[in-house]
Amino acid sequence: MTSTTQAPHDAATRSLEFGASALIVFLCMCWGFNQVAVKLALPDIPPLTQAAIRSAGAALIIWAYARTRGISLDMRDHTLKAGLIAGVLFGLEFIFIYPALLYTTASRATLFIYAAPFVVVLGSHFLVPTDRFRWTQWAGLVMSFAGLVLAFGVPTPSANANQLLGDFLALSGGIVWGFTTLVLKSTSLARAAPEKTFQYQLVVSAPMLAVAAWLLGERVTQMPGAVALTSLAYQTFWVVSITFLIWFTMVARYSASRLSAFTFLTPLFGVFAGHLVMGDPITPAFAGAVALVIGGLILVNRPR
């Protein structure tokens, strides 16, 4: 990965080659297993505290990596405003999503969070006019989302105010996630080194998440155990520092709309990871859900 290479002229609409598609599937698998890692650490380290530690730790890692490679992270240039916006959005994403899980079920939250690809596609229609979906690609996007509905169930109306609050927070997290991607694709950050783009998000989000954890009363009352520390290390060193950096590099080089559609695979990998690591059951509908998501992705990424 050549970090200093800027996005090619056709990056807004560039289709994913086989190698890039395989790479994004691998990233989604890592993020699916990350869901299990967060759960394993929860008994010792609350969720927003985990997120704050991850951002702070990854910021140091990215700084060391950029310094070693001679990549400038100087923020006193034309990217500062967009970088601060991206950082705030990146922090808000987790501030919305983690508390949502306290009020609503994981399955409902998953479906609301994955409104993000629709936000990216709709936003790209106006902000990145060359990255507009055809009707067959829209059909593929809906097909992939239908796969999630089959896997997690249809959210039924609820009179429970707490659950509705959780649903709203999860949906807000998904919308913010989509806007973060749009900022990266449609502003001066699209021409910046991925390391700088990512560093903005880490440096801004770390204190935001720490303050949110404190306001919500999160506390670490004892030394975390080996399982929690290992899970946190996996999240910090691998998921955030490496896979997220690869993701932001791909956002700069390929169609954001096509890339976002692939994220529908993440919760399915999360279900599989939960089954493999924690013994969670898999329903018979899971295979059909996988087929729908994959079929939808084929339609989204068909050449013009």
Image (cartoon, rainbow, N blue to C red):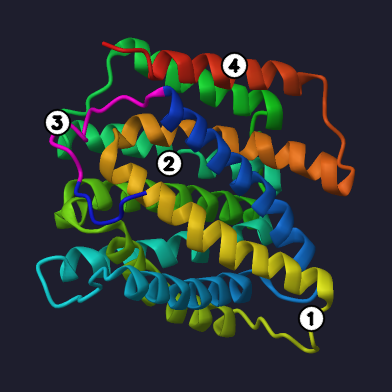
From the viewer's perspective, is 242 left or right of 1? right
Q: Residue 116, labelled with which disc?
A: 2
Does 20 sit above or below residue 190? above
What SS does tag 1 mark? loop
Residue 28, horizontal then vertical, whole percent:
56, 40
What SS does tag 3 mark? loop
Q: Which residue is mark 3?
A: 129
Q: Which residue is mark 4?
A: 292
Measure how far apart labels 3 and 4 are at the Cα level.
28 Å
Viewer-nearest of labels 3 and 1? 1
Viewer-nearest of labels 1 and 2? 1
Q: Nearer the viewer, residue 237 or 156?
A: 237
From the viewer's perspective, is 202 left or right of 184? right
From the viewer's perspective, is 55 left or right of 65? right
Give the quadrant of residue 116. top left
Precedes in sequence: disc 4 or disc 2:
2
Measure how far apart labels 4 and 1 are at the Cα level.
40 Å
